[in-house]
Amino acid sequence: MVKHFDNPLGWTDEYNPGAIISDKLKSAFWNLDGYHLIEFDPKTQPVSPAQFIIQGKILTFNIDPNKAMDDKNSTSAEVGIELEVVSGKTWKPLVKEKFWSSSSGGSRKNFGKLATMEPKEVKIENQGVARAMGNLVMQVTSYVNDIVKDLPFEAMIIGIDEENEAVMISAGSMQ
């Protein structure tokens, strides 16, 4: 499961970079083999059905047209996140890592228009931001794909049958 990332501290712009990055990560994981993404509402579901939860916060989200001063038609962007992989069964943090990505030379054509909403996806109009986020998503999916193979499998004890000396666990049918 991928939760919406928190926006940078003090974020006041109308668009939501935390939602954009989490949607891009969901899409990237959906296209990888071995992942089944789920939705989870803690208000209606007492236990998360996810084995792993990916969450985080955006540390840096800068769009700075002045960084690419050598080309008056270009812009640059920098995105930094703190990623956390949490056990979906115990909510115990398993891994925390920071990722950074930047891009320069993106077209300034749509500089004032960061993103537009399409029916099922956010389209990033600013090429510098699109490149930086695309690189960040590749880094994160590769990292998570490598580490989840080595993380221990966890399950929750949901009942104890003392009479039969048995323990019931909730681990999922595949496990």
Image (spheres, helix red, strand yellow):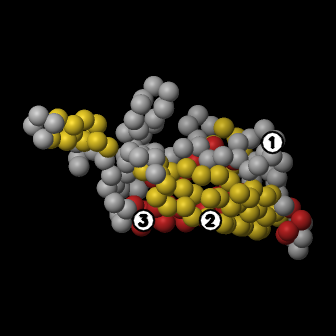
Report, in whole angstroms, how far the alpha carbon at label 3 lies from the one at label 2: 15 Å
**Closer to viewer: mark 1 or mark 3:** 3
State the residue position of label 3.
Answer: 147
Task: Give, as a three-letter code, the residue at label 1.
Answer: Asp
The front one of 117 and 8 is 8
The front one of 110 and 21 is 21
What SS does tag 1 mark? loop
Label 2: few (<14), some or many (≥20) within 10 Å? Answer: some
What SS does tag 2 mark? strand
Task: Give, as a three-letter code, the residue at label 2.
Answer: Phe
Q: Is residue 142 left or right of residue 156?
A: right
Q: Are marks 2 and 1 in contact (CB under 8 Å)?
A: no
Question: Which comes sooner in the sequence, label 3 or label 2?
Answer: 2
State the residue position of label 1.
Answer: 13
Q: Residue at x 75, y 56 (%)?
A: 61
Q: Residue furthest top?
A: 44
What SS does tag 3 mark? helix
Q: Is residue 129 left or right of residue 163?
A: right
Q: Is residue 139 above or below residue 164?
A: below
Q: Residue at x 79, y 45 (%)?
A: 11
Report, in whole angstroms, how far the alpha carbon at label 1 lies from the one at label 3: 34 Å
Q: Is residue 80 above or below residue 122?
A: below
State the residue position of label 2.
Answer: 99
Residue 12: x and y, percent?
A: 81, 41
Residue 64: x and y, percent?
A: 84, 61
Q: Residue at x 66, y 38 (%)?
A: 117
Question: Which comes sooner in the sequence, label 1 or label 3?
Answer: 1
Res. 26 visible in picture: no
Q: Residue furthest front?
A: 162
